[in-house]
Image: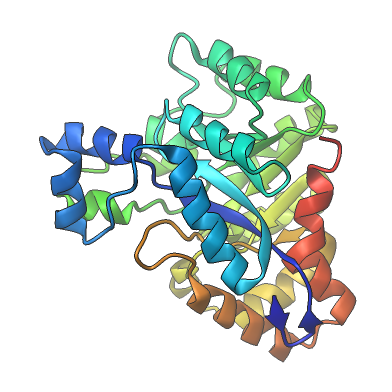
Amino acid sequence: MQTPWGDFPASDAHVHFFSRRFFEALGSQAGMRAETVARTTGFELPPEDPVELARQWAATLDGVGVTRAALIASVPGDEASVAAAVAAFPGRFYGYFMLNPLEPNAVERVRQAFASGMHAVCLFPAMHGYSVHDARVQPVFEEAASEPGRAVFVHCGVLTVGIRKKLGLASPFDMRFSNPLDLHAIALRYRGLTFLIPHFGAGYFREALMLADLCPNVYLDTSSSNSWTRYEGLDLKTVFRRALEAIGAGRLLFGTDSSFFPRGWNYEVFEAQGRALLDVGISTEDARLIFAENFQQIFEEL
């Protein structure tokens, strides 16, 4: 990837894999066929074979110099789509999958997903209405901690799902369960397990920094437009500066939150983050950590 700090292979820690199964799942909620979901949203309907969608992403990322990316199964139960993509492009794609840990088969799903080659389980406490301290969630942490090189992604803060709005679907999320500090005791208990907090905590920036400062196994991903900054009167330059001061470049993971075609990879997010970091004045070494090496190091055991 061509950056202000030179040309080097980059990693994107946050790409949603909107498979055909994803369109079908949302369509069933909205009373639509997958084709109608695509027309309504203006998104391109993906091929039925997830490997073909993976090839599309690989070609798109080749064009911008991104050599590694996390692909996120974006509805519960779609881990097989991402597992197929990871198997087709080993070392190129890393699989994350969404889980509702309150479902009765949750731990078995985690076990099977990791056995199929997935790398991180994604928890959305506000979406599914639970505390990370709920006794039903603990076996998920135990299972992830028992597998070397695995991680737990926990969405905190403001949660909006743009495609649900386009389809007129309600999003009855509960932000009582969105505070990153809820993870403090858990991250300390599972010191060998990596925790990933997207979007700098998505409005709980101070709390995300406190958590990461106290727990060296917590990483923050930089993905999305980070529109939550309007709640705190911050700009992206200030966000990066404060994050670098609190936890350093070694625990920041560049991500875009890219998701659908025909847009493909969200170059505008990269451009905005690059400008902010350039204004902060980071070194080439730190830029390589954020844009490439930190992500690689998390999963290097696999």
Above-or-below relation of 301 to 235: above
Q: Which residue appears farthest toward the right when viewing the image? A: 285
Q: Residue at x 49, y 40 (%)?
A: 51
**Which residue is nearer to you in this view: 172 or 103?**
103
240 to 294, vertically: above or below: below
**Residue 192: x percent and y percent?**
85, 32
For image coordinates 73% across by 88% down, the residue present is 4
Query: Is residue 158 shown left or right of residue 106?
Result: left
Which residue is more in the foreground, 40 or 62? 62
- Can see residue 265? yes
- Confirm whether residue 215 shows in the render: no
The colour scheme is rainbow
Q: Residue at x 71, y 18 (%)?
A: 142
Question: In the visual, does 130 lie left or right of 45?
Answer: right
Seen at 54% across and 61% down, the residue is 59
Q: Position of residue 264 (x, y in %)?
A: 43, 65
Looking at the image, is 266 positioned above or below residue 295?
Answer: below
As drawn, the residue found furthest toward the left would be: 31
The picture places residue 15, in percent across and down from the top left corner, at: 52, 54
Query: For the image shown, how many numbered marks are present on the structure?
Result: 0
> Residue 253 appears at what percent x and percent y?
70, 59
